[in-house]
Amino acid sequence: MNTDTLDIQERIERGKRIKDIRENELHLNKSQLARKIGVSSQFLGLVEDGKGNLMYKNIKNLKDISGHSSDYILYGLDDSLIKETNEILEKYDEKQIKAALRMLKNIGLFIKNKDA
């Protein structure tokens, strides 16, 4: 496949993901989501059909609204672990998170030294 074909295919897949997020997760119509991310509903329709691309600020808005990573929106990379981790981390303050990370690091070093 040549690069143009791959670009078109990626745009189509991206559009399907955005449509899926809009319909099945956010339960919004095109006009509602378009308004929230800062584009026209006509342009959002083009994006969902794989005929257009969102700009950075629109992707950031969609990321913020949906809770998905931009890697998922753009490339379809699984972000369930990131979402789950963020949900867990929201329950703790920065000091608690840093202490837990230090403990994890020490556990990792212990395991590494034990196996050596």
Image (tube, grey):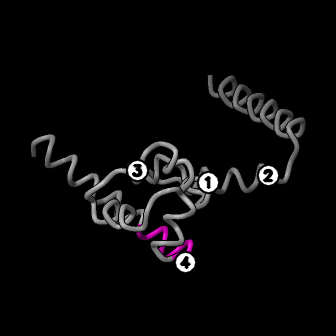
| Real-space CA distance between mark 3 and mark 4, rounded to the nearest whole angstrom | 20 Å
Residue highlighted by disc 4 = 27
Q: Residues within 10 Å of mark 1 (few under 14, many from 20)?
A: few
Looking at the picture, tell me which residue is in the foreground, 16 or 39: 39
- The amino acid beneath tag 2 is Glu
Indicate the quadrant where residue 103 lies.
Answer: top right
Q: Taking 56 as reference, is 2 left or right?
A: left
- The amino acid beneath tag 4 is His
Q: Residues within 10 Å of mark 4 (few under 14, many from 20)?
A: few
| Real-space CA distance between mark 1 and mark 2, rounded to the nearest whole angstrom | 15 Å
Kind of element beneath mark 4: loop
Residue highlighted by disc 3 = 54
Q: Taking 108 as reference, is 22 left or right?
A: left
Q: Give the answer, above or below, for where 71 lies relative to 22.
A: above
Pair 3/4: label in front: 3
- The amino acid beneath tag 3 is Leu
Pair 4/2: label in front: 4
> Residue at (54%, 50%) from the top-left corner?
69
| Real-space CA distance between mark 2 and mark 3, rounded to the nearest whole angstrom | 29 Å
